[in-house]
Image: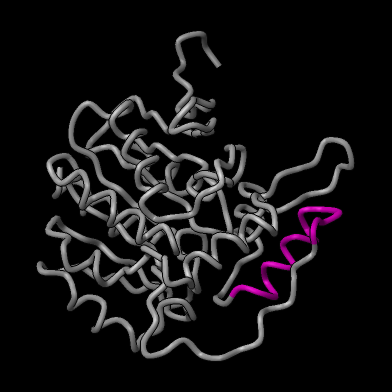
Amino acid sequence: MSPTTRIPWHSGSHAINGFDQFCREWRPSREDAPPVLALHGSLTQSGMWIALAEMVATVRMMCPDQRGFGRSGDPGTDACADFAADALALARRSFAARYVVMGHSFACAIALETALRDEGRVAAVVLVDPVVRVGPAPAAAPPPSPPASFASLEEAARHFRATEEGDWSDAALGHLVRDIMIRDEASGRWRFPYTPARLARLRAFAASSASDYDLLAKAKGTRVPVLVFRGGASKRFPVAAEVPFLSTFPTTAELVQCPASGHFPTATEPGIVVAALKPFLARVG
């Protein structure tokens, strides 16, 4: 590598809203669309966006570890408003002009909340397999607790293949696991990018009467362009939820199906995602 070669990935921590937040930033030498603030879901961390950013190539992407996930601190609160405040603070310090906010899974509500709070600067919203329920939540036994750690990334990949729907190639699964799991230096074992207590606390709040994660209510107020990706085999965003969800937006929301995917279309069918995302970003820019 020559001394003048620009390294697109930059990472580091900064103080924000009372805790230290870790961020990865993809800084391409050429940008052909507004920058993207990418918010990971509750099972991952900022590393989930690495492969997508590199495939999109010419779009700047700011990818934080959200509070309590990955390498970021945990200030102890779980409200969508708090996550959105973190996103807004990061956007204000990082982007001089308009930007796009993108969320995966539970972070789709955070992305919409961010857009509602920063209407003058958010150019568009991208939602990757949001969690959309149709009808009352089913009464079901809680899922079994996953292993606390894994001896190898291959063992972690087998766990993901057994617990996540969709058609996973070995390469896609290996890439995702490598990008999101965290290695304990003392033991050499691999762990999830969150603690079981942190995830349980978030899910308990989201299911409580105090929850502010009402995705449909946030969609009703969203007036910027919206691009939605749905995994064809997704259990979190079933096909029956498509029309009720999309019709909630006051403007037309564009839906892209990733037919072989479950909850992680950016990992399992990144080609479909990139083919729709790049022209969408160019249009809203």
Q: Quadrant of the N terminus?
A: top right
Residue displayed at 24% across by 83% down = 244
Residue 285 lies in quadrant: top left
Name of the residue lying farthest toward the right: 187
Pick the residue in front: 24 or 204.
Answer: 204
Provide residue 15's location: percent of width, then percent of height: 48, 26
In the picture, measured across the screen, residue 169 lies left or right of residue 21, that is: right
Pick the residue in front: 189 or 211.
Answer: 211
Secondary structure mostly taken by the magenta-highlighted segment of the chain: helix
Whether residue 151 is in magenta: the answer is yes
Residue displayed at 42% across by 72% down = 209
> Number of callouts in the render?
0
Residue 61 lies in quadrant: top left
Pick the residue in front: 204 or 95.
Answer: 204
The answer to whether residue 135 is above or below residue 56 is: below
Which region shows up in magenta? 148-164
Name of the residue lying farthest toward the top: 3
Name of the residue lying farthest toward the front: 209
In the picture, measured across the screen, residue 55 lies left or right of residue 195, that is: left
